[in-house]
Image: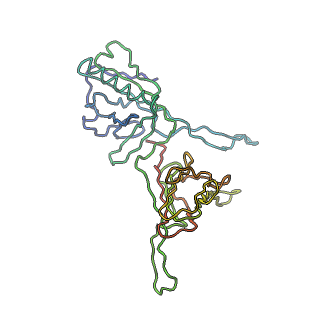
């Protein structure tokens, strides 16, 4: 645990008291906030709040660490089979002060409760906002550090806490969802003697872009009519050292006996979540039995462009696919 020292008098304002960006290690100029499990937002870089971040002690905002699964190579060394991202720990030092002991104590206790309640009520969110308006956040659980310095003079009108926050998912996410809509194209007669142009955002072969650094797991909403739903992704890969392609897909059959519904009618909706896996009809009923097990793969979107095919058998006017996801990033 790093030792953080600070004066016991009211310190200089690191952010001008207005929430302007301050320099954070591994990040640059940014504004930091913490949202507790109850939804209350706590500024971490504004002295007017009665506390602020000791920025020289902040760490853990860079790329995630990984554990490797390897196979020994007969000629020496090893070959990487799999890399798994590990939980992240973030160290965040806070300096808390007050005009008198009771004011300081009230602030200290309130902050301690805001962080430790993550152990009982679910994670809070640490968010880093850039001057250009972009934001990245990460779910955090309090681990340790809110005990103060324990040195002479501390804990009277000021003290510093070096908090360790544990993150089960090591990746940062953009709090603004990406949404994509694809629908049935306009139908027209083949015999009309003039070219007909329909929307490019149609069902069939399309490209979906993931602007993040790592795989995302979207939520799909399918609107009928549709009698059979098949989603396929095609990925470029190397096969025996030569360029090739692999595909992953899943099929949902609303007429499957495990579902017992029949084809989706116009306007009816079913939602497929990929993480955690679930399939729910609009009334909340469980349709996971309608997936093409055991071959079904509820695939995610790789960083960059993804070649995807949406096939809705029995589609017609109003048939559509909507997906939402939050881009995920290695760093804050």
* Frontmost residue, 119 versus 15: 119
* Frontmost residue, 224 versus 181: 224
- Which residue: 41% across, 34% down? 37
Report the side of 240 relative to 61 (left or right): right
- Percent from the top left, x then y, of residue 259? 60, 55
Point out the residue furthest to the bottom here.
193
Point out the residue furthest to the right here.
74
Taking 8 as reference, is 85 above or below it?
Answer: below
- Percent from the top left, x then y, of residue 287? 58, 52
- Percent from the top left, x then y, of residue 309? 56, 63
Point out the residue furthest to the left here.
99
* Frontmost residue, 40 versus 319: 319
* Frontmost residue, 210 versus 255: 255
- Percent from the top left, x then y, of residue 238? 66, 57
Q: Quadrant of the C terminus?
A: top left
Report the side of 18 relative to 242 (left or right): left
Report the side of 187 relative to 253 (left or right): left
Quadrant hosting residue 102? top left
Q: How many marks?
A: 0
- Which residue: 38% across, 18% down? 149
Quadrant hosting residue 72? top right
Report the side of 6 relative to 269 (left or right): left
């Amino acid at each position: 645990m790093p030792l953080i020292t600070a004066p016991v008098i009211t310190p200089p304002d690191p952010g001008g008291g207005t929430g302007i960006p301050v320099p954070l290690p591994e990040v640059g100029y940014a504004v930091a906030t913490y949202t507790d499990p109850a939804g209350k937002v706590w500024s971490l870089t504004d002295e007017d709040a009665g506390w602020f971040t000791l920025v020289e002690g902040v760490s853990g905002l860079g790329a995630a660490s990984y554990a490797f699964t390897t196979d020994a190579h007969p000629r020496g060394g090893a070959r990487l089979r799999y890399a798994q991202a590990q939980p992240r720990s973030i160290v965040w030092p806070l300096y808390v002060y007050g005009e008198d002991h009771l004011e300081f104590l009230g602030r200290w206790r309130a902050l301690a409760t805001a962080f430790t309640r993550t152990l009982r009520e679910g994670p809070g969110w640490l968010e880093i906002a850039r001057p250009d308006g972009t934001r990245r956040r990460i779910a955090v659980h309090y681990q340790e550090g809110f005990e103060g310095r324990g040195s002479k003079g501390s804990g009277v009108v000021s003290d510093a806490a070096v908090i360790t926050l544990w993150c089960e998912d090591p990746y940062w996410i953009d709090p603004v969802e990406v949404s994509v809509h694809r629908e049935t194209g306009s139908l027209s007669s083949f015999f009309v003697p003039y070219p007909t142009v329909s929307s490019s955002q149609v069902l069939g072969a399309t490209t979906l872009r993931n602007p993040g650094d790592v795989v995302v797991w979207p939520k799909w909403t399918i609107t009928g009519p549709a009698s059979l739903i098949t989603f396929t992704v095609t990925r470029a890969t190397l096969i025996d050292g030569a360029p090739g392609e692999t595909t992953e897909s899943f099929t949902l059959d609303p007429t499957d006996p495990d579902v017992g519904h029949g084809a989706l009618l116009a306007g009816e909706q079913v939602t497929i979540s990929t993480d955690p896996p679930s399939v729910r009809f609009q009334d909340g009923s469980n349709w996971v039995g309608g997936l093409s097990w055991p071959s079904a793969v509820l695939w995610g979107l790789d960083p960059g462009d993804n070649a995807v095919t949406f096939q809705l058998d029995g589609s017609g006017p109003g048939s559509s696919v909507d997906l939402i996801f939050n881009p995920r990033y290695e760093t804050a």
